[in-house]
Image: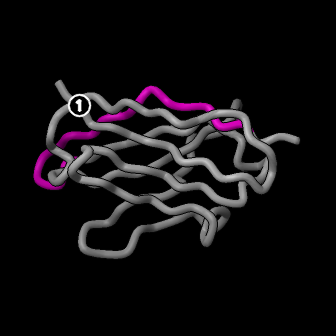
């Protein structure tokens, strides 16, 4: 069974940076594309950043130029580098993995990011 384990969330101040990690429990990272979503209470989960096979990543307009989705295959880990954080970035962040050649579609447990002064 494949699992995603997220980490790196926390409480930061506006303007700070944070890097979220999403580690895959099995060595299948090369067989998947990954995305980060976020959700706040009472709202739908929204896409933050997504890898697209053989293309540049896709980012929500609200995070373009501030966030980056990165991967380190040797570590079975995908990152969300978040810079210049704003209070409106406060949310529960989820990692999602989808199989490139399979119907795999799995989610992590979520990691909380709070941006407040």
Q: Position of residue 79 (x, y in %)?
A: 43, 50
Residue at which label 1 appears: 25
Q: Where is residue 12 in the image (x, y as percent from the top left)?
A: 74, 41
| Res 42 → quadrant | top right
In the displayed structure, does residue 67 sit left or right of residue 62? left
Instruction: Name the secondary structure under disc 1.
Output: loop
Callout 1: few (<14), some (14-19), or many (20+) C-alpha neighbours within 10 Å? Answer: some
From the viewer's perspective, is residue 98 above or below residue 1?
A: below
| Res 85 → quadrant | bottom right
Q: Where is residue 98 in the image (x, y as percent from the top left)?
A: 26, 47
Q: Which of these two is toward me, 29 or 43?
A: 29
In percent of the image, x 55 and y 39: which residue is there? 93
* Magenta part of the chain: 99-114
Q: Does the magenta stretch include residue 108?
A: yes
In percent of the image, x 83 and y 40: which residue is there? 116
Residue extending furthest toward the bottom: 55
Q: Does the magenta stretch include residue 23?
A: no
Q: Which of these two is toward me, 105 or 66?
A: 66
From the viewer's perspective, is residue 33 above or below residue 8?
A: below
For the C terminus, give its image quadrant: top right
Q: Which of these two is toward me, 59 or 25?
A: 25
């Amino acid at each position: 069974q494949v699992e995603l384990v997220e980490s790196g969330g926390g409480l930061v101040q506006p303007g700070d940076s944070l890097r979220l990690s999403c580690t895959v429990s099995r060595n299948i990272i090369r067989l998947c594309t990954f995305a980060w979503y976020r959700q706040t209470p009472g709202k739908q989960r929204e896409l933050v950043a997504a890898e697209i096979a053989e293309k540049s990543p896709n980012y929500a307009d609200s995070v373009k130029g501030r966030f980056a989705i990165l991967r380190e295959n040797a570590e079975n880990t995908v990152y969300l580098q978040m810079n210049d954080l704003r209070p409106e970035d406060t949310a529960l962040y989820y990692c999602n993995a989808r199989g490139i050649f399979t119907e795999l579609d799995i989610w992590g447990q979520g990691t909380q990011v709070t941006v407040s002064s």
